[in-house]
């Protein structure tokens, strides 16, 4: 087991190294002159040269990559071109709203989607199943900002139940914090619910045909125990896997959701950075989110043994 | 027997065969209603895009400050935006951008992904390296990857297509590699190898045709996701130039005013959702009809 954990952690190192190399190299493989594009159309030649020097584009690629990766390993993601602040500081300032939104969405999606998928599989072919799967297709098709504006229009503008936009730090109280995040959470969670519900249903359909399920039913185990104890446990591995893979959807969706609901998180930081062409910030955010994504999926791989004791390493 | 009937006979047969094919196609659509509905809606959207100039539209980029932010009326069916541009015309022309991006990304990423996947599946020594690179690219969330690429290039439809394609290629490559690896073990491929068939023949006769079913399903999903990503990029200001009528751009312009003029966002949102829904239904239908084993469970 320990050997597996070590091996699995070691395999993530080349993956992260490639991500770093790729994100770094984009500056060099992008068509045109990135310094001129980042400086903008009104920039003087001196401005362009200043940006070229601050990005290190005037020095050899390999030397620059070695320096840059050495600093990244030490936790230095460079300096923002626009604000002149360290990128790590900008990220640290914005992390709470994004983290809150993503954790709430994760909880919301799992709590809704897993029972939905289980019931859809149990009643396969019935109207409950058709409604749940129709909802899933809809969840995949309606873009996240459309859901966001629709919910904000209905529940904030028309019914006035919840705030239209904004964010309250959790230090100012749990309820004000939660109130501001309800609509963004539902918005961001919809596509995630669709994804998890579909996989849950597919896996459960497979498990429900197994002999041990028939045995459990034959010996008179209550239906809900058959579904949620005997079957769901055995369907857990693919479901947990898709929850991990879906984090990528969540990260992309957070950028948009934060724009719609004016939440001052990492998504807003990214959007502001694009409008100002502040590449070091974008680079830092991409690297950080990729690291989070890789680590979450690493953790999920390691939990397989807890979910399913048959898996041994 | 006259010469006329001699020439007529094959023609009639051809018509019969044609009818047979049409009847089979109709039966296929009846059995798979989601293919019929999704495909039908998609064709409708494509027609709207192609015939945009004939659908009662005006110049979608014409600015008229005197008639800004009008609500929908008989004259301006979907109202006007902050610069006085006709939203109906912009939405109709926007179908062109969305569909162009969706189809281009689906086709380009399929071709490149297929090549990489076949290479990794056949040239075994390269597999480890290619798969590590793919793992690396797949751990960058696709939207962020596209955002990073767009931050370094000028906003244009072409650059948006390239950015989204780069983000989608790893998924196709991984799918194709998996299919190739499982097909290589099939008895008929082994038989072909034993018969002395060369690698190109094995690829083109035995492997490639079998990748088409999973690839076409994957391509429809990529098309749907590309249309959403394009709208997101334009919405946050990293997509096609603001003057270009695209659904994401129209919504971006409506953002500041959405509380008082929600229709500016509503119309492009409805068109985008319907189009993506159509593509997704087509994909689901194709998946069920191309893989009957899956259809029973999924």
Image (cartoon, rainbow, N blue to C red):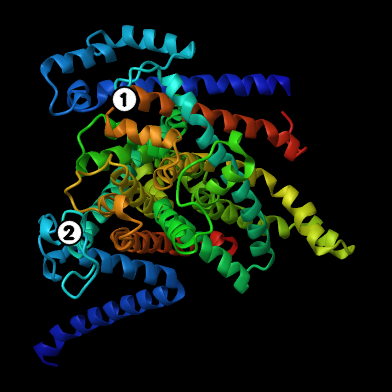
Q: Position of residue A228 (x, y in %)?
A: 76, 55
Subunit under mark 2: B
Q: Which labelled disc corresponds to residue B68?
A: 2
Vertically, is A289 above or below A9? below
Name the residue nearer the viewer: B241 or B214. B241
- Image quadrant in which the N terminus of chain A is located: top right
Q: Residue at x 35, y 74 (%)?
A: B25
The reply to whether residue A28 is visible in this rendering is yes
Say above or below: A96 vs A240.
above
- Which residue is drawn at the image coordinates 53% and 58% (left, top)? A161
Q: Position of residue A173 (x, y in %)?
A: 62, 39
In-image side of B167 versus A74 (left or right): left
Select label 2 or label 1 by which is in front.
Answer: 2
Residue appearing at x 11%, y 55% in the figure: B63
In terms of secondary structure, where does tag 1 sit? helix
- Badge 1 sits on which subunit? A
Quarter of the image with the C terminus of chain A in it? top right
Q: Is residue A197 left or right of residue A77?
A: right
Q: Secondary structure at mark 2?
A: loop
Count residues near mark 1 (Cα–Cα under 10 Å), then give few for <14, some for 14-19, many for 20+: many
Q: Which residue is mark 1?
A: A279
Q: Name the foreground residue: A239 vs B172.
A: A239
- The answer to whether any part of residue B121 appears in the image is no
Numbered marks: total: 2
Q: Position of residue A142 (x, y in %)?
A: 42, 58
Q: Residue at x 38, y 20 (%)?
A: A21
Disc 2/disc 1 C-alpha distance (Å):
35 Å
């Amino acid at each position: 087991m320990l050997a597996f954990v070590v091996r699995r952690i070691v395999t993530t190192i080349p993956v992260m190294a490639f991500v770093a190399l790729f994100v770094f190299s984009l500056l060099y493989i992008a068509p045109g002159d990135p310094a001129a594009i980042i400086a903008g159309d009104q920039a003087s030649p001196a401005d362009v040269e200043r940006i070229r020097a601050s990005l290190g584009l005037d020095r050899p690629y390999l030397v620059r990559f070695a320096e840059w990766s050495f600093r990244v390993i030490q936790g230095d993601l460079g300096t923002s071109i626009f604000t002149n602040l360290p990128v790590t500081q900008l990220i640290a300032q914005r992390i709470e709203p994004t983290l809150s939104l993503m954790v709430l969405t994760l909880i919301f999606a799992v709590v809704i989607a897993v029972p939905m998928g289980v019931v859809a599989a149990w009643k396969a072919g019935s109207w409950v199943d058709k409604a749940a799967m129709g909802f899933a297709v809809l969840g995949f098709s309606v873009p996240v900002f459309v859901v966001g504006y629709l919910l904000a229009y209905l529940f904030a503008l028309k019914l006035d139940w919840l705030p239209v936009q904004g964010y309250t730090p959790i230090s100012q109280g749990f309820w004000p914090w939660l109130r501001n995040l309800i609509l963004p959470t539902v918005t961001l969670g919809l596509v995630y619910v669709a994804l998890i519900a579909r996989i849950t249903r597919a896996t459960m359909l497979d498990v429900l045909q197994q002999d041990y399920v028939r045995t459990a039913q034959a010996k008179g185990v209550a239906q809900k125990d058959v579904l949620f104890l005997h079957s769901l446990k055995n369907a857990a591995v693919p479901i947990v896997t898709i929850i991990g893979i879906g984090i990528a959807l969540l990260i992309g969706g957070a950028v948009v959701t934060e724009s719609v609901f004016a939440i001052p998180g990492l998504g807003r930081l990214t959007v502001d950075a694009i409008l100002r062409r502040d590449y070091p910030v974008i680079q830092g955010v991409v690297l950080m989110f990729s690291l989070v994504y890789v680590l979450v999926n690493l953790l999920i791989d390691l939990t397989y043994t807890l979910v399913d004791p048959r898996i041994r390493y | 027997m006259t010469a006329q009937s001699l020439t007529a006979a094959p023609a009639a047969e051809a018509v019969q065969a044609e009818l047979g094919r049409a009847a089979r196609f109709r039966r296929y659509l009846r059995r798979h209603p989601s293919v019929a509905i999704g495909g039908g809606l998609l064709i409708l959207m494509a027609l709207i895009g192609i015939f945009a100039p004939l659908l009662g539209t005006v110049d979608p980029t014409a600015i008229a400050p005197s008639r800004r932010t009008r609500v929908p009326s008989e004259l301006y069916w979907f109202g006007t935006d902050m610069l006085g541009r006709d939203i109906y015309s912009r939405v109709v022309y926007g179908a062109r951008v969305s569909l162009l991006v969706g189809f281009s990304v689906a086709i380009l990423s399929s071709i490149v992904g297929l090549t990489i996947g076949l290479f990794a599946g056949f040239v075994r020594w390269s597999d480890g390296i290619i798969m590590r690179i793919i793992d690396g690219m797949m751990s960058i969330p696709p939207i962020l990857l596209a955002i990073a690429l767009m931050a370094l290039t000028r906003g244009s439809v072409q650059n948006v297509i390239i950015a989204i394609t780069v983000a989608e290629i790893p998924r196709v490559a991984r799918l194709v590699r998996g299919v190739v690896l499982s097909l290589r073990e099939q008895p008929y491929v082994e038989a072909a190898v034993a018969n002395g068939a060369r690698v190109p023949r094995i690829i083109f006769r035995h492997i490639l045709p079998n990748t088409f079913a999973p690839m076409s399903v994957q391509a429809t999903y990529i098309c749907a996701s590309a249309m959403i990503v394009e709208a997101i990029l334009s919405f946050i200001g990293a997509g096609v130039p603001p003057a270009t009528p695209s659904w994401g751009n129209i919504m971006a312009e409506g953002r500041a005013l959405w509380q008082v003029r929600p229709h500016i966002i509503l119309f492009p949102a409805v068109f985008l959702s319907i189009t993506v829904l159509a593509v997704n239904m087509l994909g689901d239908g194709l998946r069920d009809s191309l893989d009957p084993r899956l259809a029973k469970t999924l």
